Amino acid sequence: MGGSDGILGNRDIERSKATIGSNSTRRKWLKRRETWLVVLGVILHAVYMLSIFDIYFKTPIVHGMDPVTPRFNAPAKRLVLLVADGLRADKFFEPDSEGNYRAPFLRSIIKGKGRWGVSHARPPTESRPGHVALIAGFYEDPSAVTKGWKANPVEFDSVFNRSHHTFAFGSPDIVPIFCGAVPHSTWNTYPHEYEDFATDASFLDEWSFDQFQSLLNRSNEDSKLKELLLQDNLVIFLHLLGCDSNGHAHRPFSSIYLNNVKVVDSIAERVYHMVEDHFKDNRTAYIFTADHGMSDKGSHGDGHPSNTDTPLVAWGAGVKNPKPISGTNHSHCNFRFVDEHIHDAPTPVEWGLNEIERVDVNQADIAPLMSTLVGLPCPVNSVGSLPLDYINMTEMEEVEAVVSNTKQVLNQFLRKSYIKQSNSLYFKPFKQLANYSAVLDQIERLISFRNYEAAMKLSENLRSLALQGLHYFQTYDWLMLMTIITLGYIGWMIYLFVHVLQSYTSMPGNISRKEQAARQRSYTGKINLCGCLFMGALSILLFLEHSPPLYHAYTTMTVFLWTRIINEYWSIRALWIYLRGRKFNYIIKLVVTSAVALFILELLVNSFTDRKLYTWCFLITGAIASLYLLKSIPWRSGIPIFVCIACWFLSIFTLMPAQIPDNNQLVIASGAMIILIGLVARWLDLHAEGNKFWLSISNHGVKRPKFPMLFHLQALLVGLSSVMVSLSTSHRTEKQELLALHQLINWAIAGFSMVLPLFSANGLLSRLTSIFLGFAPPFLLLSIGYEAVFYGALALVLMAWILFENTVLYLSKVKKPSSSIKIVEDHLTLDHDTRCLQLSDVRIPLIFVRNTGSWMEIGNSISHFGIVSAQVVFVLLLFALTNVYTKDIKCDSALESSQKAM
């Protein structure tokens, strides 16, 4: 017979009969094997997903370095650090709607007595990582992510550690991290209960100021405190949380957030005058900045400029005065900051600061800046580079400051090099720093000869090489780990492919399974022994190199998978022999299908950074699918038009901003749209008997729902959830806390509605409609804008997909002559109504791996790896959940439909 898809759906009648004869045994074997595969898949992806912590999230902290004592006089006796948590740069610098600037005091500092710029934060833009970069000078120890960046998982050095004494006031989530274990510190925090998102949080900033004011007032009566405040190397830290809390609760465009900018500016002004009046020595340096910004929808964490761009203003002792802008002010035009911003990016005109030099820094650069201002050793784990454009020192002192900064970074490099060399059987050094000691000697000679310019250039070059060396040892194991993980993922795909061929196709190798059984057992034993020996050898090698336990897990999993693959040699050999014997046309068809699959997968990868690709995908898919259906079935069925409209409707959403703007009215309207979709589906389910293309999804002839009014109850819950959304939004707008009864109703609606689909009729369309309505209330209650419409659009496309597949399956049957129905049934089924896979079925999983939600771009591929790996595990769990809702669905088979039609 013609039209064969070969290995995927081979039309060999005798082969099918042999397979059908052992249906019972085959089903039991298949169930056991696939249960094992699911468990293995979950373990494999869980283990491999942990590899990002060893590859990308490896801790940068090493211990055992001595601090580098500065060889210059400190320009300031004390430092005041003001951190406005969650303050984004544009809202700080730009004017309001009336043309007035929100931070008049700090603008006067920028124009009259200080320096300014943008501090560039690196993702993850969270509070703890930002403060670690500011105060300790390195980018967050990633192991802290497992503790929510709250507690200290490891010890690290900071400016506070090096100070003579630190005074700190602010949030209980930040201040204890840096002061809790520092004996020479005085600190206080407000209770967690103060962080109420239903109110204006600017009072938290006032609390921090009041604590500092009270401290200075007490010093007038407390002689010990007064003596302590008069010491050198003091650090005063005020953590101002208001902008962060108000940004989360009310968004950064709200009047509450923007007013909070004025509050922190006022606090900066009052702190400045209070400190100057108290000490009267002009020996205080001030730094005002933020740990991260705030996105338009009131969140942070990713690499969007609204989150990474934070304001930086420095003034006081040791800080340069403002400098007029000129074309020769900057010379590092090719430099990129840690958030990938290009150096010398143009300053927005609306900021009104184009005539004053702007000096941008990486966030970690602020730690050596603070250390230099008060004459402290740089934190030993700092990777920041001292921004000289902020420092007002003599040329000799500038060189000495840069040399101290360079030696501190170099010490880290040397320590990491020593640790890696002592644990490696074959050590590969960082060759560019092989002669570092000679370079240090040369720098010292140049300083002694007062050739400061040459010494500065050589020091900065050595620091740059030391930073490269740190990166080299941070990524030392990358090649080995990536090779193991890549081989593991490839092995998993090959193993699954072989399983699919053996279990769901009439694979030629299955014919000789009995004849090969004895030989296979002998072969398998030898391969397993070799695999165990190889696995043991690798484990011994990793043990000798003191590798982490997870390294053993990665290699064990990869060797195990490839051992299993080699055990399937006879199946792979049978497939190869079969393919060699096929006609050229089939090989071309297989190659084309593989090329299309690879193209779609590559499109998926690129869609992580360019969501608009999905718009074109759905526009093209909708057009092609509808044209195909129009050629095959009458347009009066409505299916071709419905498929096109659904796909085109969904294509709109990937053009919309990933940061969803608030639109309460749209959420409420979406509830009405969902109910309308449900009503249409309900009508089609009850009145589709005249349309043969809807037979396979209608519920006629199956059991009725246990509760006749179930549909009406579900529609009522959708409407009620829309009402609750409106009430919740009104409470938030009026800065009122949600009542306990209100919260209880929301939880009850969400929980009850998700259980109801289990009691619906077991027809395909009936159950899908019920599931659609059942999950709509919790989705609406969690929505703030257009994503509520997306829920309905996605449901329409999923329904269009089901209709398309049913139509294709129906057409593949009715094209056969009536006399061949029995033959078709024999050779296209494995057991009962389960047919063999065909080459054309490749489109189904390719269309499924798609992700059309509004994932936020976080500026690096780590999140993409995590998303994809987690998605694979999530899909397995989703299938298990889906089975609960759909296991009893009854639908007409395509074969029955075709028999009825003919």
Image (tube, rainbow, N blue to C red):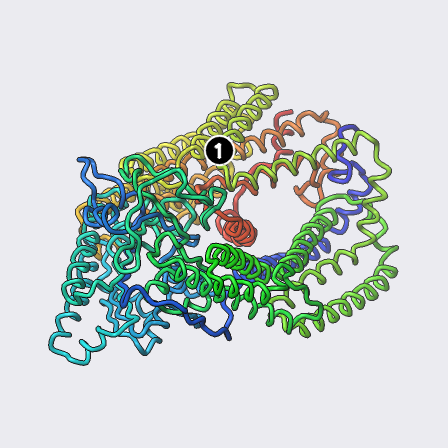
Q: Residue 666, how many percent across, how many down? A: 30, 35
Amino acid type for the residue under numbered disc 1? Lys
Residue lying at the far front in this picture: please name it. 449
Question: Tag 1's secondary structure?
Answer: loop
Residue lying at the far bottom in this picture: please name it. 224
The answer to whether one can see residue 571 in this image is: yes
Q: Residue 724, how many percent across, how many down? A: 25, 45
Considering the image in quadrants, where does the C terminus appear?
top right
Q: Judge left or right: residue 613 versus residue 680.
A: right
Please tell me which residue is depicted at 62% across the width and 59% down the height of the picture. Answer: 432
Q: Residue 190, how many percent across, how many down? A: 22, 67
Q: Residue 230, how many percent across, how many down? A: 22, 73
Closest to the observer: 88 or 749?
88
Quadrant in the rendering for residue 520: bottom right
Quadrant in the rendering for residue 328: top left
Asked if 861 appears above or below 274 in the picture, the reply is above
Please tell me which residue is depicted at 49% across the width and 56% down the height of the picture. Answer: 460
Label 1, on which residue?
612
Residue lying at the far left in this picture: please name it. 221
Closest to the observer: 89 or 293?
89
Crowding around mark 1 (Cα neighbors within 10 Å: few <14, some 14 to 19, many 20+) is: some
Asked if 163 appears above or below 677 in the picture, the reply is below
